[in-house]
Image: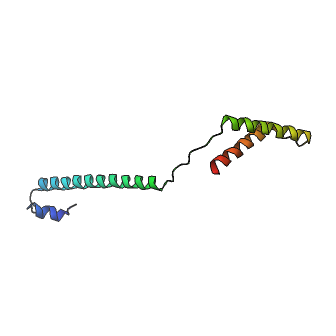
Amino acid sequence: MKTVFELIEDNGLTLHGDIEHFAELVRGAEREWVETNNQACKILRQVHDMLAMASVPPRKTWSGLTDDEINKIYEQAETLVHDSWVGKVGLMFPITLCKMFEDKLKEKNNG
């Protein structure tokens, strides 16, 4: 952006000359500066977004459980809970089943 003195000198004005003309030159210079600044901000936002996307590691595909795995875990949980009651430990089926599902999902997804 030009300084006030550059605007005066470049347009052949005197300090006591055409004030309205000078004011319009200043407004024009301000608009030019704002447009340039807006454009620079837009470019910086795009660069920021590109860098942010480049620094994010790709997400690993989530692996759920197949029907066969669910059925197998269910049967294992049934057996484990049944056997625990025989020995008087008394595992709860829903908690045991959820824990076994959780363990299998962790195994599949965190390897």
In the rendered image, is residue 15 in sight? no
Name of the residue lying farthest toward the right: 87
Q: How many marks?
A: 0
Q: State the colouring used for the structure image.
A: rainbow
Q: State whether residue 35 is above or below residue 62.
A: below
Camera-side residue of 28 and 53: 53
- Does residue 10 appear to the left or right of 69 in the view shown? left
Q: Which residue is drawn at 16% across and 55% down?
A: 25
In the rendered image, is residue 53 in sight? yes
Q: State whether residue 83 is above or below residue 56.
A: above
Q: Where is residue 60 in the image (x, y as percent from the top left)?
A: 56, 48
- Does residue 93 appear to the left or right of 60 in the view shown? right
Q: Residue at x 24, y 56 (%)?
A: 33
Q: Where is residue 74 in the image (x, y as percent from the top left)?
A: 75, 36
Q: Where is residue 63 in the image (x, y as percent from the top left)?
A: 61, 43
Q: Residue at x 22, y 60 (%)?
A: 1
Quarter where residue 77 is shown: top right
Q: Residue at x 81, y 36 (%)?
A: 78
- Does residue 49 appear to the left or right of 87 in the view shown? left
Q: State whether residue 30 is above or below residue 83.
A: below
Quarter where residue 73 is shown: top right
Name of the residue lying farthest toward the front: 68
